[in-house]
Image (spheres, rainbow, N blue to C red):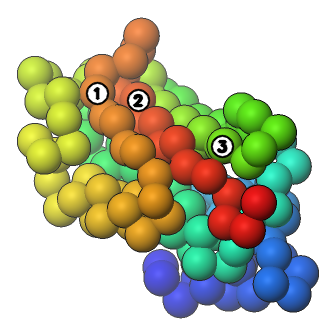
Amino acid sequence: MLAALHEQLYSTDEGDRVDLARYVKKVTGFIAKTRPSHVEIRAESDTVHVSSQQAASIGIILNEFATNSFKHAFPEDRPGLVSFTIRRLTAAGEVELVCEDDGIGMNGKTSVAAGGLGMKIAEAVSTQVGGVLSLGNGAQGVRLSLRFSVAGT
């Protein structure tokens, strides 16, 4: 999967900046090919240009969240939705990535530390981009939020 993420990264590379909206669309298209048939994937993103390192980190988080959702959120072929949203919060370059599913939730585990290896990877990646990661139960299912500043702005 990591090789596929890098392939998607290079195909959306615009020099030293990556159009995150295009990259997320390609990565989620790849993730959709690996999803269970009872789970839908949605993604939307503001136009944000980030460094290739930040884009690679976002790709890893998208993949880890989707993998965990596919594995844990929808038991017994329960239909569901995994969604990814990227919003520019400020003109100064603050951005938020939100990953959500409408599955069964975390059953009392409401922190990154309580999560498995995939969430620990997401935490390490968020540190690489200088972001703040939060994970918990959302209105429905699990919600992960990563706030970070675009490198070079």
Q: Nearer the viewer, mark 3 or mark 1?
A: 3
The quadrant holding residue 120 is: bottom left
The quadrant holding residue 52 is: bottom right
Q: What amino acid is found at the position of numbered circle 1 in the picture?
A: Gly
Q: Earlier in the sequence, mark 3 or mark 1?
A: 3
Q: What amino acid is found at the position of numbered circle 3 in the picture?
A: Val
Instruction: Give the alpha-carbon distance from disc 3 to disc 1, as whole Å.
Output: 19 Å
* CB under 8 Å between discs 3 and 1: no
Q: Is residue 138 shown above or below 21? A: above
Instruction: Give the alpha-carbon distance from disc 1 to disc 2, as whole Å.
Output: 6 Å
Q: Earlier in the sequence, mark 2 or mark 3?
A: 3
- Of residues 75 and 128, the one drawn nearer to the viewer in this rendering: 128
Answer left or right for 26 relative to 135: right
Figure label count: 3
The residue shown at (48%, 82%) is 2
- Of residues 85 and 27, the one drawn nearer to the viewer in this rendering: 85
- The tag on residue 95 is 3
Q: Earlier in the sequence, mark 1 or mark 2?
A: 1
* CB under 8 Å between discs 1 and 2: yes
- Name the residue beneath numbered marker 2: 143
Q: Residue furthest top?
A: 139
Q: Is residue 133 shown above or below 34? A: above
- Name the residue beneath numbered marker 1: 136
Q: What amino acid is found at the position of numbered circle 2 in the picture?
A: Arg
Q: Does the image show residue 103? A: no
Answer left or right for 29 relative to 78: right
The residue shown at (47%, 79%) is 1
